[in-house]
Amino acid sequence: MASAETPRDIFNSEVLLVLMPCDRSNDFIHRVTDNYPGISVRWFNVAASDGKLIGCDDIPVEVWEGVTMLCTYQLPKAELLPGLKFAQLTSACSDQCD
C-alpha cells in the first residue's frame, strides 16, 4: 500500500507567520524547515512590554509581506494578507472578537 505522507516539498515558496506572545522558538522553526525545505518561517512576538498584546494593526507592514500561512490568536484585516491560503487560530472563541 502506498504511503499517505505529505510530500516534503508541498510548502515550497510558502511563508508562515507565527504571531505569539513569546520569544521566537528556534527549535520549532528548525523542525518545520527541516521537515519542509523551502518554507520560510517568520516569528513576531506580540507581547508588549506592559504585558498587553500587540494588536494586528500595530504590527509593522513589512511583517505581513508575502505571508501565505498564519498562526495567530486573532485574525488581521484581510487587506494585510492578500496571498493568505491557511490560518490556524491558537484560541477558542476567536470568532467572538471584534
Image: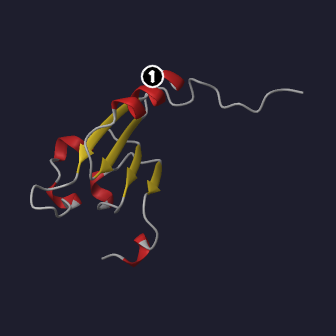
Which residue is found at the position 10% from the left and 55% from the top? 49
15 is higher (above) or lower (below) than 45: above
Residue at 41 percent across and 70 percent down: it is 94
Name the amino acid, label 1. Answer: Gly
The quadrant in which the C terminus is found is bottom left
Left or right? Give the position of 31 relative to 49. right
Estimate the x, y position of residue 30 in percent, counting from the top left: 41, 26
Q: Residue furthest right?
A: 1
Label 1 packing within 10 angstroms: few (<14), some (14-19), many (20+): some
Check disc 1 and report its element: helix, strand or loop. loop
Q: Residue at x 43, y 64 (%)?
A: 91
Percent position (x, y) of residue 73? 36, 60
**How many labels sit on residues?**
1
Residue that carries the numbered disc 1 in the rendered image: 38
Q: How is the image coloured?
A: secondary structure
Residue under the point 35% across and 45% down? 18
Rendered image quadrant of residue 39: top left
Task: In the rendered view, tell whether residue 98 sits above or below residue 55.
Answer: below
Looking at the picture, how far across and down is residue 1, in whole percent? 90, 27
**Direction from residue 80 to residue 87 in the image, left or right:** right
Q: Percent position (x, y) of residue 62?
A: 18, 41
- Residue 97 is drawn in which quadrant? bottom left
From what the image shows, is residue 97 above or below residue 6? below
Return the residue found at the far left: 50
